[in-house]
């Protein structure tokens, strides 16, 4: 039986992908002999990215319980180099989704966002 640390190391790529696409991890622990990863993501695209990472490690998911749900209204804090289209590409897989982010965030000019600004992911 693998330990928590061994399973966490095995599925580290899933956690890294989750961080990359905006997953909020709600629970990460050992449930019986399986690693439980429970979290929320801002889009179906992000959820599919998580599942692609899981299947790349163990297609049968024999030693993990992955419970990832889509939740609208999550937030993201703008960092240097961000644009709404880059954010849209990262979280939705489509740069054209920037208008929906602007609308959800109450941004009148999608070309003008500021570092530290908190935006809403619809």
Image: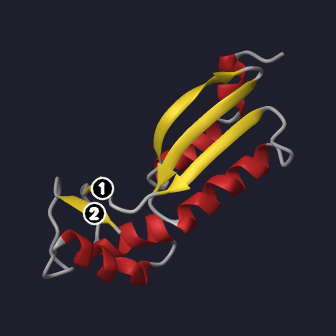
Q: Quadrant of residue 10?
A: top right
Q: Would you say 66 lies left or right of 18 here?
A: right
Q: Secondary structure at mark 2?
A: strand
Q: Residue at x 48, y 50 (%)?
A: 40
Cα distance between the residues tagged 1 and 2: 4 Å
Of 57 and 63, nearer the camera is 63
Q: Secondary structure at mark 1?
A: strand
Q: Residue at x 52, y 72 (%)?
A: 93
Q: How many marks?
A: 2
Q: Residue 86, percent across and down? A: 38, 70
Of 39 and 8, nearer the camera is 39
The C terminus: image quadrant: bottom left
Q: Is residue 51 above or below residue 113?
A: above
Q: Residue at x 68, y 36 (%)?
A: 11
Q: List the residue tagged with mark 1.
A: 75
Q: Residue 111, percent across and down? A: 19, 80
Observer able to see residue 9: no
Q: Residue 81, percent across and down? A: 28, 62
Q: Residue at x 30, y 55 (%)?
A: 76
Tag shown at residue 97: none
Q: Residue 60, percent across and down? A: 86, 45
Badge 1: residue crowd in 10 Å (few <14, some 14–19, many ≥20): some
Badge 2: residue crowd in 10 Å (few <14, some 14–19, many ≥20): some
Pick whichever of labels 1 and 2 is earlier in the sequence: 1
Q: Quadrant of residue 120?
A: bottom left
Does the CB distance between marks 1 and 2 fall below 8 Å?
A: yes
Q: Is residue 57 above or below residue 75?
A: above
Q: List the residue tagged with mark 2.
A: 120
Q: Would you say 42 lies left or right of 98 here?
A: right
Observer able to see residue 1: yes
The N terminus: image quadrant: top right
């Amino acid at each position: 039986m693998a330990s928590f640390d061994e399973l966490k190391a095995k599925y580290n790529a899933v956690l890294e992908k989750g961080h990359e696409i905006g997953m909020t991890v709600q629970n990460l622990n050992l449930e019986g002999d399986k690693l439980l990863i429970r979290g929320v993501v801002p889009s179906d695209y992000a959820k599919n990215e998580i599942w692609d990472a899981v299947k790349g490690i163990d297609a049968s998911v024999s030693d993990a319980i992955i419970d990832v749900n889509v939740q609208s209204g999550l937030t993201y804090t703008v960092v240097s180099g961000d644009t709404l289209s880059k954010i849209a590409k990262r979280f939705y897989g489509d740069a054209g989704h920037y208008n929906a982010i602007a609308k959800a965030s109450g941004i009148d000019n999608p070309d003008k966002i500021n570092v530290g600004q908190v935006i809403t992911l619809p």
